[in-house]
């Protein structure tokens, strides 16, 4: 259904759909030399199952080295860039359950091997930086308690890849009407996937602002108490998509992004496409969880919008009434086979898959 402009400033459509499960596929060994200023070699990750995946990978940073992990029941893992310039990293192992571990270097290395568990822990020598939740998953930098990646050397590479989206190279389904709240036109462009694989590993991207979408299951702060300065006057208790065990996403709990229904390439029937959201030096992985639609007479169609949980991960004010940021947010929405988690409410799975997709995107767009 579509919410009326007369009652709410956002128009969100909820198409009839069926929930589908898409296999994540098997990731082959990935080598990235020089793309992030270091040489990384990922291990092999089995396809995800309901119980989790298999741990993988060694990472090399400067003269450091680390060994691969063991089997993990909390999610799938991959190795990659370690991020330190010197020092050695001791072997890191992943144990089962919902806890992950990583061993930092003795001279500033990032995580040696990080796990995909939900509540990672850090150990190691002075200057070492470990991982939590999905860890940095081969992207370097460090992760905070929410699993947001901070200070990854991949950020500057990704911003360079996504800096030149104009009317001249926009995708065909870009209506020309997408805009920020300030009225700045926003275009949507694409990055190549792996040749011959139905664009697997490819992505759409746009640079915009971020408004806060509080829609979904009601919580203490969504919509918030009436009369409160943080109350969301346009709150709606549904989202276009949800996980297999719920009827809607929860804005305070689930990292999701709102994408206009006119944009082709993402799954407009089932949602769930992984979206990497970049703000300043942070990378937050979310899913395509809600939609918005243009209506005749509107001056433009907002395109930069995400859940409370997504905003919090990026350090953006998350009040549904007064939060958000006016510019500087980059959205990278992955397309093609393997771009959707089995459960769009499983944050560990979202983060692990997001990191793999980013590594593939960098490999396909050197």
Image (cartoon, helix red, strand yellow):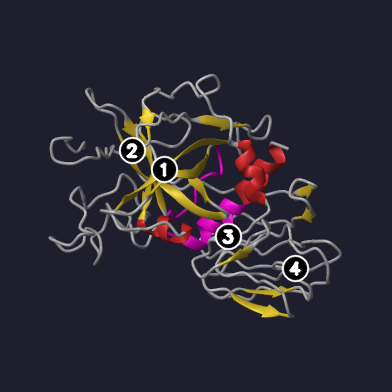
- Could you say whether the residue bearing mark 4 is in a helix, strand or loop? loop
Q: How far apart, in angstroms, are the residues tagged by discs 4 and 1?
A: 33 Å
If you read the primary sequence from the N terminus, does the residue marked by circle 4 or circle 1 appear first? 4
At x 13% / y 40%, what residue is drawn?
7
If you read the primary sequence from the N terminus, does the residue marked by circle 4 or circle 3 appear first? 4
Q: Are marks 3 and 1 in contact (CB under 8 Å)?
A: no
Q: Residues within 10 Å of mark 1 (few under 14, many from 20)?
A: many
At x 77% / y 61%, what residue is drawn?
59
Closest to the camera, between mark 4 and mark 2, is 2
- Residue position marked by numbered label 4 in the rendering: 109
Q: Residue 149 bears which disc, if any?
A: 3
Q: How far apart, in angstroms, are the residues tagged by discs 2 and 1?
A: 8 Å
Q: Quadrant of residue 197?
A: top right
If you read the primary sequence from the N terminus, does the residue marked by circle 4 or circle 2 appear first? 4
Closest to the camera, between mark 4 and mark 1, is 1
**Span shown in magenta:** 336-355
Closest to the camera, between mark 2 and mark 3, is 2
- Quarter containing the N terminus: top left
- Could you say whether the residue bearing mark 2 is in a helix, strand or loop? loop
Q: Residues within 10 Å of mark 2 (few under 14, many from 20)?
A: some
- Could you say whether the residue bearing mark 3 is in a helix, strand or loop? strand
Residue 337 is a magenta residue: yes
- Residue position marked by numbered label 1 in the rendering: 209
Q: Residue 156 bears which disc, if any?
A: none
Closest to the camera, between mark 3 and mark 1, is 1
Residue 169 visible from this viewpoint: yes
Q: Are marks 2 and 1 in contact (CB under 8 Å)?
A: yes
- Residue position marked by numbered label 2 in the rendering: 181
- Could you say whether the residue bearing mark 1 is in a helix, strand or loop? strand
């Amino acid at each position: 259904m579509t919410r009326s402009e007369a009652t709410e400033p956002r128009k969100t459509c909820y198409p009839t759909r069926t929930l589908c499960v898409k296999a994540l596929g098997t990731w082959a060994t990935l080598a990235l030399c020089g793309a992030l200023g270091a040489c990384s070699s990922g291990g092999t990750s089995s396809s995800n199952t309901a119980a989790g995946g298999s741990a993988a990978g060694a990472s090399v940073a400067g003269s450091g080295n680390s060994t691969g992990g063991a089997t993990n029941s909390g999610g799938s893992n991959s190795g990659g860039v370690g991020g330190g310039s010197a020092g050695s990293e001791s072997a890191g192992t992943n144990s089962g359950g919902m806890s992950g571990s990583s061993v930092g270097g003795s001279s500033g290395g990032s995580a040696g091997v990080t796990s995909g568990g939900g509540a990672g822990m850090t150990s190691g020598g002075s200057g070492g930086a470990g991982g939590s939740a999905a860890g940095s998953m081969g992207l370097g930098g460090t992760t905070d308690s929410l699993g947001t990646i901070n200070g990854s050397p991949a950020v500057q590479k990704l911003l360079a890849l996504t800096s030149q989206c104009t009317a001249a190279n926009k995708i065909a389904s870009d209506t020309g009407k997408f805009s920020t709240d300030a009225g700045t036109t926003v275009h949507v462009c694409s990055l190549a996937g792996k040749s011959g694989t139905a664009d697997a590993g490819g992505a759409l991207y746009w640079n915009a602002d971020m408004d806060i979408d509080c829609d979904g299951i009601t919580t203490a702060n969504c919509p918030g108490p009436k009369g409160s300065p943080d109350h969301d006057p346009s709150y709606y208790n549904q989202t276009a998509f949800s996980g297999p065990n719920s009827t809607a996403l929860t804005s305070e709990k689930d990292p999701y992004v709102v994408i206009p229904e006119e944009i082709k390439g993402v799954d407009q029937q089932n949602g769930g496409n992984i979206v990497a959201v970049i703000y300043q030096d942070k990378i937050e992985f979310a899913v395509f969880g809600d939609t918005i639609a243009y209506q005749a007479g509107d001056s433009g169609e907002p395109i930069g919008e995400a859940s409370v949980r997504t905003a919090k991960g990026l350090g953006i004010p998350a009040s549904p009434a007064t939060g958000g940021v006016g510019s500087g947010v980059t959205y990278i929405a992955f397309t093609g086979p393997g771009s959707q988690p089995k459960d769009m409410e499983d944050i560990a799975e979202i983060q692990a898959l997001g990191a793999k997709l980013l590594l593939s995107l960098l490999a396909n767009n050197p």
